[in-house]
Image: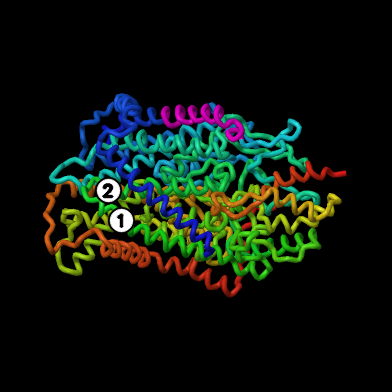
Amino acid sequence: MTASGVFYVVIYFLVLLALTKPLGLYMANVFEGRRTFLTPVLRPLERLTYRACGVREDVEQRWTQYAASLIAFSLVGFLFVYAMQRLEGFLPLNPMGFGTAHAPANQTAMTPDLAFNTAVSFVTNTNWQAYGGETTLSYWVQMTALTVQNFVSAAAGIAVAIALVRGFARKQMRSIGNFWVDLTRGTLYVLLPLSFLLALFLCARGVPQTLAAYVKARTLEGRVQTIAVGPVASQEAPKLLGTNGGGFFNQNSAHPYENPTPLTNFVEILAILAIPAGLTYTFGKMVGDTRQGWTLFAAMSVLFFVGVFICTHAEQAGNPNLARLGVETRATAGQPGGNMEGKELRFGIPGSALFTVATTDASCGAVNSMLDSYTPLGGLIPMFNLQTDEVIFGGVGSGLYGILLYAILGVFIAGLMVGRTPEYLGKKIEQKEVKMAMIAVISTAFAILVFAAVTLDARFAAHGYWNPPGPAVANVQNGGPHGFSEVLYAFSSASENNGSAFAGLNANTPWYNLTLGLAMLLGRFLFMIPVLAIAGSLAAKKKIPETSGTLPTHGALFAGLLVGVVLVVGALTFFPALSLGPIVEYLLMLKGKLYSSLILTAWS
Amino acid sequence: MWRQLAPALRAMVFFTLLTGLIYPGVMTALCQALFPRQANGSLVKVRGRIVGSALIGQKFTQPQYFHPRPSASNYDASASAASNDGPTSEALVERVKAAIAQFRKDNPDYSGPIPSDLVTASASGLDPDISVASAEAQAARVAAARGVSVAQVRALIRQQVERPTLGFLGPPRVNVLALNLALDRRFPRP
């Protein structure tokens, strides 16, 4: 790791740290219904929302009703996105004519399975892209289907986290809040104002915001270059702030129009982790002990630094297979060194690796460099981040409720060791809570490992419906252990609602669209519903006073315990699979072993 | 759950109007008014004709121009793409080997090490920049093709270098289109 790389990460962390308290305090005020500086502006809009939705803001819900609202909203959202995509040819704001007879020759057809996959993907906050934005979707679909879900699927995640926090904060109550109120407040007070500012900033630095058709240029050497533009800034901002990650363009935040400068890159990485980091403070504030929130923040920071260090180091060390050909892999004054395959020069190695670690710490999945071309250990970090349920700051909302599940498992394990009933924040952790936490953790692991295993062995007739290339492994681009990593990563990304990819995998076939879509649904709802069940169960409990025998859940000891639980659960579940992929590939790379491509790429 | 469908439907319609039409609409109007150049793609015009975008890389193969990084999309700005070749991929090694051979052939005067960005494909396939070392490695070829001295071309490169933002963000770099436009202005071809 270079000195400037270390400096980059340290400055980044300090800015994130400085944002955590003000943002967290603001969110606590918003979700507890207190007055904020934006109340005079937004309160009328908030009331209008409740009237439009037919919701009474003073009526609270039990956890079952809360979950039912969440599922109903997601179902309607899914139908909206699906319908918009299928009908894009008949809808306005479609200057390139996607879905019509006038579509560009390089259009990706919007098949039913692709529309299903994309709709599930955006509603579950995964934002996996089996399509290329600029060759598939009209501006109408980008705005009214995808941008909308960038807001509301993120707000739904925050809502569930807030409901869980209320479970800890309340005593002997049957209700955990109102889903519609939390959804509205998260959208109006948190995501919309921040997106407004970020979109303006991004546009000022070069991100387009136009409804006009693609531009035709004649280059200096006389070639015709068609340049895709569109309403990019307004989608880019909530894409990052809501840890969504579905880009306007195929190449996401690597595309110069989504991420034009080193400064926008830095700000985009901040936008990914700002709300998740702030929520740790919101949590501490709402349970009446900010030390509890800072302890979660500290545990996350440790894991964050370990990941960034390993990933940056591996990428800066570069690929020995290319070094042997005479490529300079050491950084010098005039060039960045390292592994630059699949990376943009303006970000360099530190700006690429930090983005990758942040986007997989969170459930964001935006990428500014191509993970498939990372060195084996550089690619191991994002994969392991996904598999440990994205709890290092994590997705908006999902990071907080994820780490709180690990905290529940942590006090349970500690309780077993000392032989006392485990408690967390004055609540007895009993059979029901631990069961629910295990359902959540196991169901995502199940979705990753079982779907990946079935896919590796699934055989289909070539040119058939399910998978035209034939067996499902025929869709991987790279041979050897790297091809295995591509499949494992895809199901990790889908199940954990991340959406980033080892993009060599051709995932736009009915088999992959459907299985990845199912993995996303399992990962989203078999995690959220147990979380809400825990919230309901905790809210109904009494608060028991702290005694000398209570395990303190703030401070370094508990942070250490939490880090240990995350690593042990992740390692025990996924170490065998990871050894077959990135770890063995690392060893083979050092020996200079190469694999031929399994399918031909569109290389020219 | 069925009782929740009515508010769900109404909420979806409301938020679609608010965040799907009003918000992007307002942003479009504001950005077009405040930052018209950026909002339309930072297009570069020469004598009134659009020659590209300052942010989007384009293909150069002629010897009198600086060449950009390899691109998996062949600089097709309507379909961005990366190679997605893994680190142990034979295709990657063969491609880089060929790119190095081609570079050495095109630039016989350069014998230094190969900068890491010069022969590897970018993430977007549209990377507008090359490193300073990658530009300097091509200086002799460009100078010969334009009939000017290498020192003059090097001086022009130095003028075009963008330093790291705030001193630490991103490596020093050169925008290929901007550099080539400056070349055309400064040393018009005979």
Identify the subunit bearing mark 2. Answer: A
Q: Secondary structure at mark 1?
A: helix
Q: Secondary structure at mark 2?
A: helix
Q: Which residues are magenta?
A: B16-40
Is A15 rendered above or below residue B36?
Answer: below
Is B159 rendered above or below residue A41?
Answer: below
* Among the two numbered marks 1 and 2 on one chain, the one whose residue lies closer to the N terminus: 2
- Write the residue at 84% across / 51% down: B148
Q: Quadrant of residue A593?
A: bottom right
Q: In the drawing, does residue A224 fall left or right of residue A503?
A: right
Kind of residue at disc 2: Phe
Q: In the drawing, does residue A233 fall left or right of residue A162?
A: right
> On the image, numbered disc 2 is attached to which residue?
A283
In this view, the residue in front, B124 or A195, is A195
- Does A217 lie within the magenta span? no
- Does B34 lie within the magenta span? yes
Q: For mark 1, does the 10 Å Cα neighbourhood hold few (<14), some (14 to 19), or many (20 or more) residues?
A: many
Kind of residue at disc 1: Leu
